[in-house]
Amino acid sequence: MATIGESSAQLALRDPDIRLMLRVRADEPGAFAELVEHYQERLIAVLHHLMGNADEAEDLAQEVFLRVYRARKRYRPRSKFSTWLFTIANNVALTALRNRNRALPLEVRDSGTLGVEPVKKLVADPDSGPSQRMQREELAQRVQKALETLNERQRMAVILNKFEDMNYAEIGEVMGLSVMAVKSLLSRARANLRAALQDYIEVESQAQDDGVVESEQP
Amino acid sequence: MSDPAPRDKDEHEDLVAYLDGELDEEAARAVEAKLSRDPRARAEAEALKLTWDLLDYLPRPEPSASFTHRTLERVAALRPTGPQPVRQATRRRWVRLAWVATWLLAAGIGFGAVAFWPASLWPVAPEDDIERLARDLRVIENVRLYQYADDIKFLRDLDHPDLFGDDLPGY
């Protein structure tokens, strides 16, 4: 095994996933399977939210794992393992999104209306609509549509921040951006999301206020 | 509800960063002061929080049952097969040959040094060592016989002239 610098050794001590990846690098039997098992759910979730398609997310997740395997002998632990993994995922996903856009230049992507009426109805009058599960599914679709109104970089930053709990520095490392650039990117992304879900937010806010009023009544 | 986007871009960035816990203490205090005196800023912060919470409604997709298997199969296809064992065997044979050659070379150098090193260059033993060697020379020469003696007294007795005279001097 190649010599690892002091800081890398300290990182490896703190991050068990680095130790796992070092076992993969050493071609230890079963280590790569363990890595796939450990990360597949998180990786597929991020790629699914990013691409909006389950099959495509799995294909890309496979590509990410294959790249990890091919690069194993060159692996050096310079940051958290998940940061390295999601850097690869970011590159793979951005390439796929660009190819998708090139392949369908005339596609009219209907982001769907985020009209207030159906959502209002779901929240304000739950008895008149479909079951609660159906409501959740519909709401999930609306949120996914709102996410798709963001550009690729904004979407990636939001997903890493929200679902991978990455701070701005880690997002910057994954996406090759400064902390200030991430701050600006996430600010625009949150404003865009807020605008896309504006009507629902008003309803949600109103519903919460109503709940407070009701609970305050004697 | 207030306007969706505040006029001041920097303020909005700070507000979002504050909600994300990314501001240092001083900047966080400045945002908190603004929130305490500005109801529009409070409403904006609340709307941003609600928006963020809505993302929790997104489904958490599970990998398909065959994902791990399919991925490992593709990785297995990357592993070298076929002629690789032959190549490895050849490599091992070369490594063994290299070791043998190294040992032979080291032995040759050692032999050459002993055989051809000028006597004048051999390290000279200190004088005390030479004297001790001269004194013990006869013992060293006859050590094969001494091994039959049980103790030093027996040897001294052997050396007594009354027993053997001068026919075996030195014993």
Image (cartoon, grey):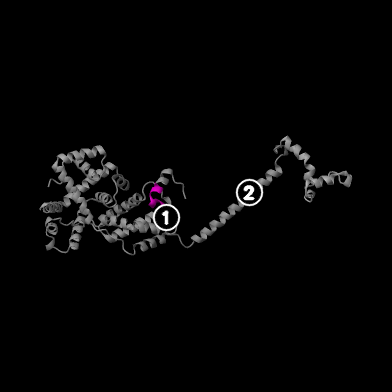
Q: Amino acid at mark 2?
A: Leu
- As drawn, the label of residue A39 is none
The answer to whether tags 1 and 2 share a subunit is: no
Residue A13 counted in the magenta span = yes
Residue A190, x across and y down, in percent:
21, 48
SS of the residue at dot 1? Answer: helix
Q: Quadrant of residue A108?
A: bottom left
Q: Is B115 positioned to the left or the right of B40 in the image?
A: right
Percent position (x, y) of residue A156? 27, 51
Residue in the image at 22% along x and 48% along y? A189
Instruction: State the residue position of label 2.
Output: B105
Mark-to-mark CA distance, 1 and 2: 39 Å
The residue marked by circle 1 belongs to what chain? A
Which x, y percent locates residue B60? 26, 58
Provide the residue designation for mark 1.
A24
Q: Which residues are magenta?
A: A11-19
In the picture, measured across the screen, residue B105 lies left or right of residue B18, that is right
Specify few, some or many for label 2: CA neighbours under 10 Å numbering under 14, 14-19, or 20 or more.
few
**Which image quadrant: the C terminus of chain B?**
top right
Disc 1 residue type?
Answer: Val
Q: Chain of mark 2?
A: B
